[in-house]
Image (spheres, rainbow, N blue to C red):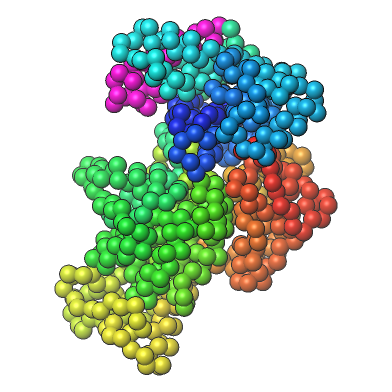
Amino acid sequence: MPLNTISWRIGGAQGTGVDAGATMFARACAFAGYHIYGEREFHSNIKGLHSYVTITVGVERVRSSREDVHLLASYDAETVASHSWAVRNGGGIIYDPRIVGEKIDSIPTMNERLKEEVLGRLRERGYEATIEGALEEASDRGVKTIPVPYLDLLKKAAEKSEGVKLSNLMVASNVVALTASAAVLRLDKSHVLRSIEEQFGAKRRVLEFNKLVVETVYNPVSEKYGGVIGIELQDQETREERYLLPGYISAALGKLAGGCRFQAYYPITPAQDECFFLESQETFKLNDGGDGSIIVIQSEDEISAIGMALGAALTGTRAATATSGPGFSLMTEMLGWAGMSEVPIVITLYQRGGPSTGLPTRHEQGDLLFALFGGHGEFPRIVLSSGDVEEAFYDAVLAQNLAERYQLPVIHLLDKAIANMLSTLPAPDLEKLRIERGIYEEDGGEYRRYRITGSGISPLSTLGGGEIFWATGNEHDEYGHITEDPVLRERMMEKRMRKLELASKEIPSDIKVKRYGGGRIGIVSWGSTKGPILDAMEELGERGLELSFLQVKLIRPFPKEEVKEFARSVERLIFVEQNYSGQLAKLASMEAGVSADHLILKFNGRPFSYQELVRDISQVLEKNVRRLVSSRRWEV
């Protein structure tokens, strides 16, 4: 990661505007010309438990989070107790003086394991087991403590605003936190006000009050603490158009741009965010100035969701569903139906911690092999994995093209880190996008929906399209009539599976894999590990250790030749994955005969930081560790 980045973190109880505060801060920095990378951590709890968001701000493109925090914005005791340890020497902590006397042992929502560790650290270092003790410990390390009287400032703003009740004031604590942060960092106030307008523009009274909060907070904090941590966010010149998006919106926009016009879903974290966004985009403007629309249906369960999407696809509509591991488990029977009936459909699979309900709001990459093999029997499917927010957009378009080209289900693998990752990216070049509809039936001749062809692809027809065909989950002949004939079974099975052979030949290598660097130590990975790996490579390169990185994007058909070639080009091979068993490494061994020299694995529900990977890569190489489990993050 470039050294010209800073890390800012905001924390508080869920339901108190932590996420909104982080988004407004990130947007303000983006307005000032900076690149953004945001990482959101929250409990599977609607209100009350602790959540926090880390925003990394950079002059150059930011690809991952830092472990150390330059500025911590807190408006409750738990944030100080949990995260003051992450603030680097010379950094700062913004806090409300009212929390100073609180005992850490009395914070009711704080994780007990973490609480014991915090108390143990304070006792060991001779500090009181209070927030004041935690602040003193930080101060003695060189951290600047910045008291901001939240309630007094909110009262002062309320005096200038009509109709604001004192009981409603604390909901604006997030605006105090982000404004104070901007003042400390000398981020121009105009960007904060503009961000506030974007957030509350439709709610005039709320907007005006929050503007008053900004005006009340910014100048006093700036005059006393501006530049106190030695960092100033001066405006950066930029000439490119950028978007600031989370991954789920990027994927949703890719679906719209790629022609998806029907999506069914059952709410499940984190996939539901994409579906809620699509619901809000019922109508939209097309590139040619015309109007477009999408039908989004919330079904009674995941089985119904994929069934509805398959029904829509049979009419010729580009159709999709989005889910997470537990929902995908329910979809596998209908997934097999799509494979048998050769229906083009996209399933966006947002991975989270499993098994069962597992870690509903936390990160993992545990569904790779499940995506490849889920469902009884054998049938062709394409599995595609995105590595960041930008790729999520273009891959969502690609997934729809592949589904229709090869007439099969395409599983688009994303994960919680990408879903909730907030990132700046260049405005997509829509002129480069192509919608490829595949092979449809031609007039004349007898229509056979499942005609046996050399490619395995038969001409498509649609329900109501004029041709009669049968769609069934049973084995069938070329017309779709059910059969158990052994010779026809062999022919139809081979016909369907030939699609993967064709896809393997046709799909360009630069879609299958991405290669970075030219060192003799090779890293292989997939998904959201891409960013921290690239940043770790940059830092290790500055230390004299040159690495190569192969990002595997197409999981099925597996790019075995590309993986073999990469393995031959390096001396040692490290697989980096966020699951327990090294699923991509198993697949590489099975498909390409390539074995990992080292595994770096993580499965505690939190993404990698680039600093963590710097340590891990150095350790496996220096100590020749075969399997290293990375477990950074002692905080909640």
Task: State the quadrant of the C terminus.
Answer: top right
Q: Nearer the viewer, residue 542 or 294?
A: 294
Main secondary structure found in the magenta portion: helix
Q: Quadrant of residue 92?
A: top right
Residue 253 among magenta residues:
no
* Residue 485 rendering spot, x and y as whole percentages: 37, 93
Vertical order, 570 against 270 (above or below) = below
Task: State the quadrant of the N terminus.
Answer: top right
Residue 202 among magenta residues:
yes
The boundaries of the magenta stretch are 194-223
Q: In which quarter of the image is residue 248?
A: top left
* Residue 42 rendering spot, x and y as whole percentages: 52, 39
Q: Among all residues in the image, which is located at the extreme right?
A: 623
Number of on-image labels: 0
Q: Is residue 401 visible?
A: no
At x 24% / y 44%, what residue is drawn? Answer: 283
Q: Quadrant of residue 522?
A: bottom right
At x 64% / y 17%, what residue is drawn? Answer: 101
At x 38% / y 51%, what residue is drawn? Answer: 267
* Residue 117 rendering spot, x and y as whole percentages: 72, 35
